[in-house]
Amino acid sequence: MLDRLAGFVVRKRLAVLVVGLLLAVVGGVASTTLFDKLTAGGFDDPKSESSRAITALDDRFGQGLPNLTLLVTSKGGVDDPSVTAAGTELTRKLGREPGVANVSSYWTTGKAPQLRGKSGHKALIMGTVTGDDTASQKRVAALADRYEGSRDGLEVKFGGYTKFQRELLEQGQKDATTGETVAIPITLVALVFIFGSAVAAALPLAVALVAMMLTMGLTWILASVTTVGSLAASVVTLLGLGLAIDYSLLMVSRYREELRSGLTPPDAIRATLTSAGRTVTFSALTVAVSSLAMAWFPLQAVRSMGYAGALTALLSGASSLIVLPALLALLGDRIEKGRVFRRRRPVTAATGPEAAGRSVESGFWHRLATTVMRRPVPIVTIVTAFLLLLGAPFLGINLGMPDERVMPASSSARQVADTVRAEFDSSEQNALQVVAPEGGGDRAAVGAYAQRLSELPHVAAVRTATGAYAEGRQAAPPDQRYARFASGDAVYFSVVPESASPDDADDADRLVGEIRSTKAPFETLVGGAAATNHDAAAALEKWLPYALGTVLLTMLVLLFLVTGSVMLPFLALVLSALSLTATFGALVWVFQDGHLAGLFGDFTPTGNIAATIPVMLFGLAFGLAMDYQVFLLSRMREEYELTGSPTAAVAQGLERTGRIVTAAAVAISVVFLAFTVSGISLVKAYGVGLPLAVLMDATLIRGAVLPAAMRLGGRATWWAPAALRRLHDRYGLREEPAAPAPKRDGDRALTS
């Protein structure tokens, strides 16, 4: 198939380039409005009890969860008569705005002390912006433009969850542009050093830009028919740039190698596509499968990144297999034009097994592999222990869900949230809603249940249709203020926790469980921010085995098709997982515990890690680690079929891929490091974790652990039963029948 593709691309190279350019332009134009279609939400399980509680609250009571907070500051004090008048008018005016409901404030609730700051100069206005995530985010942006700032002697600042979502979306758009601006010129410089030629260095970037614009266009279509999270744009931008460069590096390097062996440009393109092209195909499938495994999770933010990762991998691979060969056909041997400096010519392609062996034995990677394979046991032990030590901090991980603290200090939502935590005694914003769709007509049962809820640890107050309750007794009788808690036969309860501090997330999570286990006289649904976080974490835990099973099973099949071995797929999975230990250790050590935080810009260590980060980081990083395993093992398979020696295959395969895979790892790491310029700590985590995973895999795993493990396995490493060998011969990573393995003892040098 790839042989026929090579012939088609060479013949129709101009048409291929014109069509590719037109599609890229269309995708690029569509991407200019992509962020208007994205949402910053999606961190909840839409089928959970907490989501059903929110739906019931809206359907039966016409109310939503409080998601809008206005921080009002006055130098004269919030109890000054003129400030009271201005604050009351502001509250009433905001309450009359379309799409805004349940607006109340310090001045309209009888000067409730929980809505007044400790200094007496700050007060809160709270409400609900109705509609779905997209509509509410646009609405809060319009309201902030009109109301924020100085008005009638008051300083008004917008906060709350919907404002946080809007700023997360805007910051993501800004970060995507900044990331490209930083990554592209640095990567171009790195590519010039890798290839020594300006023309050759420009090719991976050209292919990357085409792949990115195509993926942005398809993401725009996807966002038009379903909900796509804003973090998907960062995945498309930086993962697309990285993968396309990765694949193009491999293809261009192999093409230049084939030219140096004496092939004409058309034949070199055919040889490149039927060798490196097949590796790119399987590598793209590997990353796509790892990304698509995230579709098991019901959280839309996680799914969106999975869809974006899969699209990015497939289109990066397709661009490298179609657009890049067309460019190579157009350039021919002019790919060496624009040479900046001369470097020692790399190893030429072998013309036979003996020539191959002689040509690579003096190379750095060959010498490294040979040295490692002489002492496999101590090297495996030392490197494995080192990686496990780096990963040890992960044992102390505390999982949570993202809040305003993931934003930079300049964020309005972040500033409001910090002020509320520091200066206000209540946790009204974090109140849990317990909805009873039926049974509210029995007011005695309602009161008794509210009383039981108020006796729970960490509960400050419970409000419902029968009044307010605290510490197991009624604190206020029912009046007009509590009428909104009942609607026909339905009733709901507002359970206010004692603390609003996010550091008490464990107490909030525990409270959700205690409320759900408290005996109720009617069916209840528990909602609110803490319940949403609790259910989201439970959903991640529930679906994790399915996602892991999908990744592992699919990887075993793909790697068997690459290697034709039974053992190597399992070994590759173990080594890829081992390469992630440093990534997850750094995740906790830096972003949870705050070590070296100053190196990565303005972010606040929170004492926990958003539960979505390890899941999404695993999907992306594991796919990339497997990506390099495919690069290396496919070349080792070629060498094994030529030499018949497992150790020679390792040493020669590593020598022939070592330099270019290392270069690819450096290039993609430069791209991923651009994530660290983001103002969102969620995104910074990928900027630290992904390069670590790539570099660990490309150095310690590939240079030490893999050769040592394959030496210990010997010929058994490549073994497969007859039935599976026939399956591999038919469907494996091979365009043409393999040459018979020669009778040759390639192990002598290692044992002499």
Image (cartoon, helix red, strand yellow):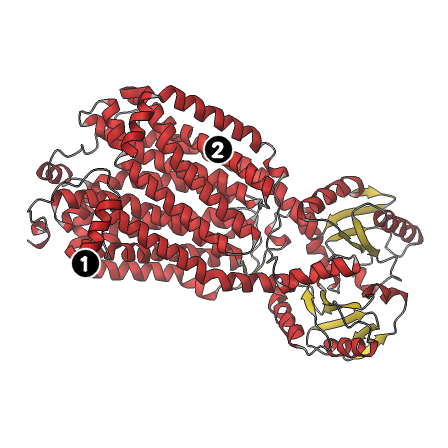
Which label's residue is closer to the chain start, 1 or 2? Answer: 2
Element marked by disc 1: helix
Give the residue drawn at x 29%, y 35%: 1
The residue tagged 1 is 713
Percent from the top left, x then y, of residue 11?
32, 21
Cβ–Cβ under 8 Å for marks 1 and 2: no
In the image, what residue type sits under mark 1?
Gly
On residue 214, which mark appears?
2
- The residue closer to the viewer here, 587 or 277, is 277
Q: Is residue 338 visible?
A: no
Establish if 423 lies above or below 92: below
Give the residue drawn at x 17%, y 55%: 722
Establish if 437 lies above or below 221: below
Q: Residues within 10 Å of mark 1 (few under 14, many from 20)?
A: some
Q: Is residue 519 visible?
A: yes
643 horizontally vs 365: left or right: left
Distance of mark 1 from mark 2, alpha carbons?
Answer: 43 Å
Percent from the top left, x then y, of residue 528?
68, 62
Instruction: Name the image quarter holding residue 336.
Output: top left
